[in-house]
Image (spheres, helix red, strand yellow):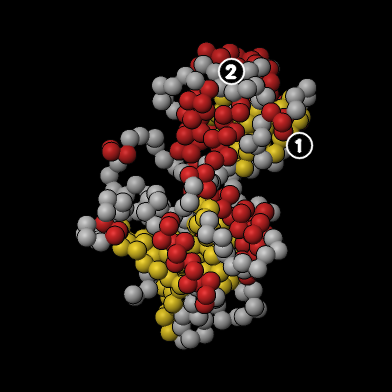
Amino acid sequence: MTAPTWSVPETEVVQRAGERIDAEHDEQDVLATIVDVEGNAYRRPGAKMLLEADGSGVGAITAGCLEDELLKAADSVRETGRPELVTYDLMEDDEDVWGLGVGCNGVIDVLLEPLDETYEPALDAFREGRDIAVLTVIEGNGDLSRGDRAYLNAESNRLEAPDGGDDWPAALAPRAADLARSGKADLVTIETDSGLLSVFIDGIAAPAELLVFGTGHDVGPVTEFAAKNDFHVTVVGFRGGVELAERFPAADDVVSTSPRDIATALELTDRTYAVVMTHNFLDDQLTVETLLASPVQYVGLMGPNERFEEMLDAFEDDGVSFDEGTFESLYTPIGLDLGGGSPYQIAHSIVAEILAVKNDREPGHLRQRTGHIHERVDTGAEGGGPPAQ
């Protein structure tokens, strides 16, 4: 497994899975997903790896401790055509293969399942920018067996099974809806009339949208870093004259418009983040005015404090006023104070700040953080937790 395929964004793993289902081939690919973690681990539940039939892999569920082992384990799934739940104990002593200095000091449960057309509803939702939850049975209750699958579209809040089955407990729907919107995953165990049922709920949220306003060469590093961090990146240019798609190949989309037409040319929602770096004062002013009047979560403005003070004066001169709290979404000067000054170092600080806002984190050193590095998902359902092993 090579570094480029190991370090791809999670969105690329999902995209690749869709490409493999769409492709005409006889080989059986396998999708590996972390469903539960006890203790500490590099990745959390929901992390995926696509194990292709030719022995290659895309994505990662650890820092390299298990990926080669999973390639071998996938062979068993290919032979049986049935999903398997495998457990890797990375807390064993040094005489065990998992204790040879590569462990994460945790126990990881990984679901290995054949990648087939039953996964298409999730891929369709991802392509269309819709939030969806994938529900997979881990331990059945008589009515449902391991590997049975259902989906919940966050817009409809209704459980649907590819085979049309109606054995899925409606009690799972609220939790699935929450996870779909947050893009998080959880292993939930509930009591049903037919017995105990353990279901892995994998929330696949539509990627957050990052709008980058500007066409300077410093826009390139921002789009690259943002794309690698699972943002859907759109570069917005003004007045034409630049081949945006050619200049910014890492961007998912490019839009050419004018500062006064932003609200109609773009969809501005509470899942949108924006970076304003046109290096043109008037363009920046008009862009910021529109963004601050929208539900956009984050508006990052390039430039020193003095420049923003001038912008405030210009707003006042133009008779533009803002409600109290409007500037809570505005970050200027943009970026975290990491001390770097090169284009890529600046881009790193910008994307790091956006991630901190998106993940509701106060930036700081992990050595100063108490408790777990990764937030634990509140089960949100009575009896939530892993099945008995």
Report which residue position mark 2 lands on: 312
**Above or below 92: residue 161:** below
- Residue at position x 66%, y 62% from top? 21
Going by the numbered disc 2, the residue's amino acid type is Leu
**Secondary element type, mark 2:** helix
Going by the numbered disc 1, the residue's amino acid type is Thr
Q: Looking at this view, is 48 or 170 the one in front?
A: 48
Closer to the observer: label 1 or label 2?
Answer: 1
Q: Is residue 76 left or right of residue 311?
A: left
**Above or below 114: residue 5:** above
Q: Looking at this view, is 301 or 106 the one in front?
A: 106
Q: Residues within 10 Å of mark 1 (few under 14, many from 20)?
A: few
Q: CA distance from mark 1 to mark 2?
A: 24 Å
Q: Earlier in the sequence, mark 1 or mark 2?
A: 1
- Residue at position x 69%, y 28% from top? 247
Report which residue position mark 1 lands on: 264
Q: Quadrant of residue 162?
A: bottom right
Q: Where's residue 35, x and y in %?
A: 43, 64
Residue 173 is at least partly visible in this image: no
Q: Residues within 10 Å of mark 2 (few under 14, many from 20)?
A: some
Q: Looking at this view, is 65 or 363 the one in front?
A: 65
Q: Where's residue 228, x and y in %?
A: 54, 40
Q: Quadrant of residue 279?
A: top right
- Locate the C terminus and report the quarter of the image it occupies: bottom left
